[in-house]
Amino acid sequence: MLSIKENLKKHKEAIKRALSLGSIMLATLICSSFLFLAIIIPLPNNLKSPVTLLLKPGYSSHHIADILQQNNVIRSKWFFLLYVKVIATNKKLIAGEYEFLPKKSLKQIVTEISKGESIVRKITIPEGLSSKQIVDLLNNEPRLSGSISEIPKEGTLFPDTYKFKYGDLRTRIIKAMEDKMTDTIAKLQPRIPKNGLIRNVDDLIKLASIVEKEAANDSEKPLVASVFLNRLKKKMKLQADPTIIYGITMGSNNLGRELSKKDLETDAPYNSYTNFGLPPTPIACPGLKALEAVLKPAQTNYLYFVVNGSGGHSFSSNLSDHNNNVKNYRELQKKK
């Protein structure tokens, strides 16, 4: 019979052998995993065509791995997680909207997500919208996030096409629009003529906003600007329908009906039929062409214009010709 001392020694040796065997098995497992990783990493995925996936903020790495595997973006969820935790330089997976292409490797997929190389979208803000309408447009873009707590002042947002990624803040685009309008006006300010008709930047934006709403296209803007500047010079009322509409809606929406005789005769701050000069504020956010048209209008003696039924306007320098243009337009409408 073995003594207690000999039994202890025997058990210790057994434990050592077990630990040694375990170490060998663990090392084999690790080596096998890295061997499989070395094989898997360069292999392309099984995608047949590009796929767009949304990885939302708060998704865990396991959730992301599940989504990628289910959509054939990666071959193995577990090798993806192992690569992220052990090999990848940047282990943070960034939320976003991604387009994954066929033949991308595991390394390329992880790099794309960890660098946040998500889809860059564009949103176009048309000229002539009010600040309220622009905010509504941004609020209706579901890929943007955050709320706009205050409607920016009228005429302070520059209409253009702006880039964004999924989850970008709406306020970031508002700030970009404000900055671009500030930069644009700073470049145009030295060109304001010293004729007293446009006294400052505020006047420039006010008249440009009216031109933006009245002109049918960019080529008409210098002509429309010349009409209003000629009327200001002669101390005539502007008689611009869009100013009345803005006074009624305050830029929140379109009027949805024709202006009535009562609308034209009601004395209100934005009624340019009852008040001389420019309105209290801009009535929209003008673009560059409208701003430049006010600074460099066409050289005309026009005082009137009316729609011609062909997508433009008929211009005239006296009331008699204007009335004939109105008559021609009404006859055209009757025929239609």
Image: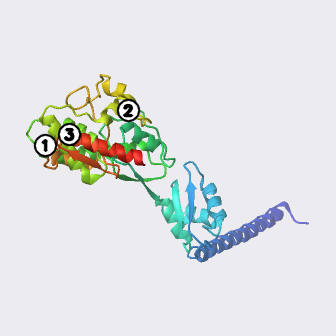
State which tag comes first along the sequence, 2 or 1.
1
Q: Earlier in the sequence, mark 2 or mark 3?
A: 2
Q: Secondary structure at mark 1?
A: loop
Relative to 24, residue 130 above or below = above
Q: Gap between marks 2 and 3, in whole Å?
A: 23 Å
Looking at the rendering, which quadrant does residue 282 occupy? top left
SS type, badge 3: helix
Mark 2 vs mark 3, foreground winner is: 3
Mark 2 touching mark 3, by CB under 8 A?
no
Residue 124 appears in the picture as rendered: yes
Amino acid type at image mark 3: Ser
Query: In the rendered image, which residue does mark 1 sit on?
Result: 192
Tell me residue 37's x, y (percent): 60, 72
Quadrant in the rendering for residue 52: bottom right
Q: Position of residue 159 (x, y in %)?
A: 33, 47
Which residue has dot 2 on it? 259
Q: Residues within 10 Å of mark 1 (few under 14, many from 20)?
A: some
